[in-house]
Amino acid sequence: MLSFRAATRADLPRAAALSALVGWNQVEADWSVFLEHGEVRLLEDAAEGLAASAALLPYGADLAWISMVLVRPDQRRRGLASALLRWAMQARPGIRGLALDATPAGRQVYGLLGFADVFGFARWSLPEALPPQAIPVRPMREADWPMVLALDTMAFGAPRLALLRNFAGRAPALVAEGGFVLARDGLRTPQIGPVVAQDEATATALVAAARSALGRPAVLDVPDAATGLAALLAAHGGAPQRPFTRMALGTMPPGQPAQNFVLAGPEFG
């Protein structure tokens, strides 16, 4: 019988090693978010380290995010991912909505479990800096947090202050009139997002400023509907790397995804 256990802080290096092994971009700081604000389950394999993992991150009372369903390559086809997904679906019985971001292969599996497509997006690389934009962008100040949280909750549909605070402590956090951008470090490359803005011009200015502040190539997750931003990225050396589909089960809180021009990442929503 499989025996999954709750993760502890001592597991963070091994969890990060597992996500690195399967080619993901997370660092220990990402795993720490799940541990501090949600739940993580692990399958121990004494001979080789961690065999599998899953995380569940609640956003308020009505939404929980399923993430980090990882299985070490030599442990696949044993039903581990399905068992972990069942745990995540049952861990918070009072939650009205569950969501996740699926790869094309995962989308087929999650669809059979009742998850429905919400929208598509793609991971983009951004090797070059974008040209400066006319809209002023400045560093975020403590006094900006009520505005940032209000904008993010409106766009995403649920509060996630702890996540945003975590990102803001890891990379430049910037604001413009009616928008903000955060970023974070990654194992292979920094990641820009989320970007929430009142319009595409503001979002473009925020992405350009974030890339400039990072000073190195980055990745970002762009909804398929943000065609103008995608065209700008492509015109300056950006390229889509792989597609994802946001999926949901149950009742999702209302949001305005059209104003979420860059997502926080498949692991965070």
Image (cartoon, grey):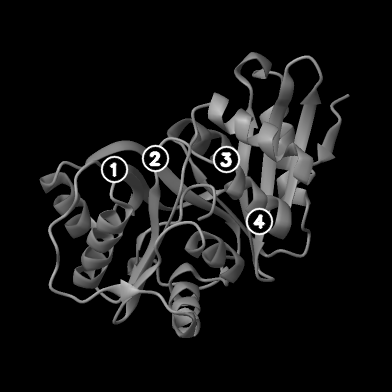
Residue type for callout 1: Pro
Q: Earlier in the sequence, mark 2 or mark 3?
A: 3
Q: Earlier in the sequence, mark 4 or mark 3?
A: 4
Q: Secondary structure at mark 2?
A: loop
Q: Marks 1 and 3, how far apart in space? A: 32 Å
Marker disc for residue 57: 4
Residue position for label 1:
217
Marker disc for residue 189: 2
**As drawn, is 125 to the left or to the right of 44?**
left
Q: Marks 2 and 3, how far apart in space? A: 28 Å
Q: Nearer the viewer, mark 1 or mark 4?
A: 1
Q: Earlier in the sequence, mark 1 or mark 4?
A: 4
Q: Earlier in the sequence, mark 4 or mark 2?
A: 4
Task: Please report the residue visible at 76 percent of the width from the left and 45 percent of the height from the top.
Answer: 9
From the top left corner, tell me how far across and down residue 79 is, in percent: 71, 24
Q: Could you tell me if the residues under marks 4 and 2 are in contact, i.e. CB atoms within 8 Å?
A: no
* Badge 3 density bin: few <14, some 14–19, many ≥20, Cα 10 Å: many
Marker disc for residue 126: none
Q: Could you tell me if the residues under marks 1 and 4 are in contact, i.e. CB atoms within 8 Å?
A: no
Q: Nearer the viewer, mark 2 or mark 3?
A: 2
Q: Secondary structure at mark 3?
A: helix
**As drawn, is 24 to the left or to the right of 207?**
right
* Badge 2 density bin: few <14, some 14–19, many ≥20, Cα 10 Å: some
Q: Could you tell me if the residues under marks 1 and 2 are in contact, i.e. CB atoms within 8 Å?
A: yes
**As drawn, is 71 to the left or to the right of 170?**
right
Q: Marks 1 and 2, how far apart in space? A: 7 Å
Residue position for label 3:
110
Compare residues 108 and 3 and report the one nearer the observer: 3
Above or below residue 33? Residue 1 is above
